[in-house]
Amino acid sequence: MKHKKGAFLCLWVYIFALFCGGCAILEQNDTQHVNSMTTISDDGKPEDPIPDVSVSEEQKPQTEMVGAPSQEQVSSVVLDVYTEKTELKKKKQQKKEPSKPIFVPESPQPIIENRPFWQSENNKQYQNLKAVAAAAQSAYDDIGSQAGWISKNGKLYSYYTQSYITTDALVSSGYLEEGLCDTDYEILLVNGRDVAQILGVEVPSEYLKFSVFASCKAEDGQVLLACATDKIGRITSVNYLGLLTQYNQAHGQIGRLSSSSAEYSRILNFVGLYEGKLEDFFVREIKKDNVYAVVTFSTRKNTANVKQHILRNDNDFWEVVYTDLQNIYNPITSVNRALPDFNLDLLPSYQLSAWKNSLYQKNDALLNIWLQRRIIKDPSDIYYQCGTSQYFYMVRNDKARFVCHLVNGAWQIVNIDSDYAARNFISARTGEDYGFMILDD
């Protein structure tokens, strides 16, 4: 009995030794293959190698004993141990592996670039400015000449209503929609070439002529400019005032020169140089300020051929800068377009182009009446005569003056003290200025 117990104990010792030997062989195989089986974890440390569970023929026990566990039993035990070890390794990896961060998109960063000021300014402000310029340009093209729209001190102005054109005026005339503040915008009428001279300004080629522009103030105090189709630029308030100064029409007091003044003779001499004639003229009047002068005159040979020239003073020399105004049917707008700094108050109230075909150098019926009434003894007594079919003016050699006017088909003759009195006499009856036929004193 004792021998049986001893034998049984030896058998179990043998099995235990065999089991330990198998484990040792497995660990040795794992070590031999570590270089090819080892992997690197996410944190940079080598992970435990995955063991090779196959058993070579050399590792199998060479002797089988009665009652000893079979190879299948041993392999089952070893597999259980391996499975338990693998599960422990997986749990360890799960603990070491960091959780993936949740992706949160970053808010877009602003792109810093050098953009034109029109893109950085309030787009609505630009659109409004362009709309004002477009409306004003259309109105000026359509009705400007007839309505007497001119440039006064650089701004669009109605000569006949004596008022500046504003956004409200454009709204009332149907060229602009309502909704804009009247005081926020100024409407200019200037030469585009003058605008283009300002640094930082670009004017489209079609607006380099006398054109309409609109302006408004930016938040920083500078001035934004636009034409009917495009942006123009951004300029300082100093440059803006400098632009308008070029169109300043205030050049001193306006006056009518006396025929006895030295300046009167000097201006006539310059007119004579331009006309290329040495003969004297019959002058109707000369009006001037400190820069410009308007001369209305005729030759002595043909008093009905009345002319009108504009002269400009440059360093005390007078130069003819606008000629034959008597042929212009819209002198207000035409002269303003050519000489935008010219003060239109220098022009006489009459328009020569409306009368040039109605003037007569003499009237034979009147001549007979003068002779019959002994107003003159001979036609050679007449120093000057000119008139229309209804009114006539005559000056004798002795400077006596007469206004003749037709009443119910009969000529009435009135002795007048001066040319001023003659103009007032006719104006009181007609409501018009007949200064184009009244000889200057």
Image (spheres, helix red, strand yellow):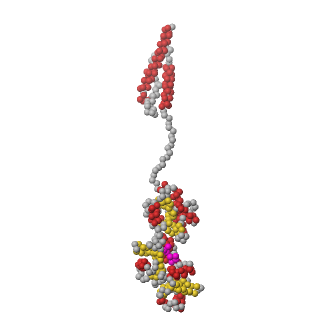
Q: Is residue 44 above or below residue 259?
A: above
Measuring from the top left, give residue 187's x and y in whole percent: 51, 64
Q: Nearer the viewer, residue 363 or 37?
A: 363
Q: Nearer the viewer, residue 224 or 355?
A: 224
Measuring from the top left, give residue 102's x and y in whole percent: 51, 39
Q: Is residue 347 magenta?
A: yes
Residue at image x 44%, y 22%?
25
Residue at image x 47%, y 75%?
255
Where residue 293 sits, quadrant-wise, is bottom left
Residue at image x 50%, y 17%?
69
- Residue 138: tell me if it is visible: no
Farthest residue in the right direction? 408
Measuring from the top left, give residue 243's x and y in whole percent: 45, 64
Q: Is residue 34 above or below residue 233?
A: above
Q: How many marks?
A: 0
Q: Which residues are magenta?
A: 345-352
- Residue 367: tell me if it is visible: yes
Q: Which SS type dominates the magenta stretch? A: loop
Q: Is residue 30 above or below residue 309?
A: above
Measuring from the top left, give residue 240's x and y in whole percent: 46, 62
Q: Is residue 421 above or below residue 334?
A: below
Q: Nearer the viewer, residue 68 or 291?
A: 291
Q: Nearer the viewer, residue 299 or 424?
A: 424
